[in-house]
Image (tube, rainbow, N blue to C red):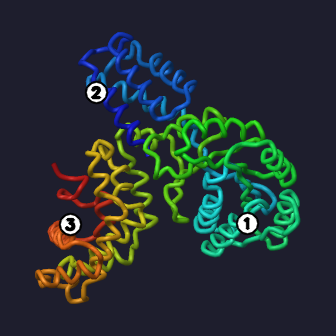
Amino acid sequence: MFDSLSERLVKATRNLSGRGRLSEENIKDSLRQVRMALLEADVALPVVRDFVSAVKERAIGEEVGRSLSPGQALVKIIHAELVSVMGPEDVALNLQCQPPAVVLLAGLQGAGKTTTAAKLALRLQERDGRKVMLASTDVHRPAAVLQLEKLAHETGSGFFPVVAGQGSREIALQALAEARVGQYDVLLLDTAGRLHVDQDMMQELREIHQAVTPTETLFVVDAMAGQDAINSARVFSETVPLTGVVLSKTDGDARGGAALSVRKVTGAPIKFLGTGEKTDALEVFHPDRIASRILGMGDVLSLVEAAEQKLDRKKSENLAKKLRKGREFDLSDLRSQLEQMLDMGGLGALLEKLPGGMGLPQGLAGKADEGMIRRQIAIINSMTPSERRFPKTINGSRRRRIAAGSGTEVQEINRLLKQQMQMQKMMKRLGKGGMGRLLQGKGGPSGPFGGH
């Protein structure tokens, strides 16, 4: 997310010559580039106008400190304004009421409401210890109800099915009654969507809202929808009082305009980002961290949090013990590290959070895709246990057999073996801790965040 916007904004701040003070004259070209970058990212025009005006007002007359270049001074101002546009930070869901607390999800068809409901259910159960029920009021699309039922089973949540012949309002009230009887803490209500906003849908949503009086009404919006997202956000916010926004499918959007527009249009804070299809692919929205990511400063805090939550401590400890005993990092170890990398969203997601990650060549992102990691795992799975333990025994005929077994080319086998050798050397230097040590910056002087 934000790839193209980040590239343009960083470029806009690099063109300032060394001046001791920012003036209207020397930031004119940079502000024009900022304006174009925001418009190309599908940020709503009124938001662009206000943003550029606010940056200009803050920048003119700003003294550039000795430790900063003019470009860095402007980056600091743009960062503060990005935080202001996307903030304030308000991630906590309001569940302070007589149980069950009702969380109502609204949005267009295809925005990701159903998967977001499952992600929220998993989060509330695993992190907050809440007992959650999922229910759908969509009487128009049976497939959507079946999908929610399947996701409820996957996440271990309760589920209330649609009752044939009843309207959405009645189903919502029955689900609420059932949640009370079952002593659930939270009822997550998934509502019907349409491909476009229409009055029937809005009236249905209004009636459900009035009937169950939710503590949270979250607007789920597809980050890739561009200006359509802004238009639908405006209509939904006029129909029911929105308390928060969930930006879905952010892993597929390079522009990110919705993130900069939807807060201003709805008046509701962005609470979560949907970062993939898996039920654990939901990130808390931190305006300051996202602003840093947009400006190529990385987001190491989120990276460390992801490492703490998703890295398998037992596997890391076993690897550390193994390396301490003098055994070498083999292909089974590499497979384990690759699987953990997938759990964290793939290499591309990790690079995005590293300082300067956005400034990497675009070709690298293509090489760092999830498909590549899965192919590498398939290659290792096609080897015998002995080959994984002793990679140097893999000769030409074995490479051809492994390539055929994994549906890959011999060149990919060669690249993987080379990668394993490089990681083996690196692990010897780190001594212990594997990827957890790398990601948390504990590699010592020769680690990724240390040394010179």
Which image quadrant is residue 322 in?
A: bottom left
Q: Amino acid at mark 2?
A: Arg
Q: Which residue is mark 2?
A: 14
Q: Secondary structure at mark 3?
A: helix
Residue 428 seen: no
N-terminal of the pair, mark 2 or mark 1, is 2
- Determine whether the residue tagged by mark 2 lies in a helix, strand or loop: helix
Considering depth in this image, is 140 or 107 the residue closer to the camera? 140
Q: Residue 71, relative to residue 358: is it above or below?
A: above
User: From this viewpoint, which residue is outermost toward the top?
Assistant: 25
Residue drawn at (64%, 33%), measured in percent from left and top? 265
Viewer-side label of 2, 1: 1
For residue 407, above or below residue 257: below
**Residue type, label 3:** Leu
Q: CA distance from mark 1 to mark 3?
A: 54 Å
Which of the marked residues, 1 or 3, is nearer the chain's N terminus? 1
Q: Which mark is residue 204?
A: none
Q: Which residue is mark 3?
A: 430
On residue 142, which mark appears?
1
Judged from the image, the secondary structure of the residue bearing numbered disc 1 is helix
Of residues 299 and 221, the one nearer the viewer is: 221
Side (left or right) of 223 relative to 28: right
Q: Toward the viewer: 235 or 218?
A: 235
Going from the N terminus, do you reach mark 2 or mark 3 first? 2
Disc 1 marks which amino acid? Answer: Pro
Q: Position of residue 116 (x, y in %)?
A: 61, 58
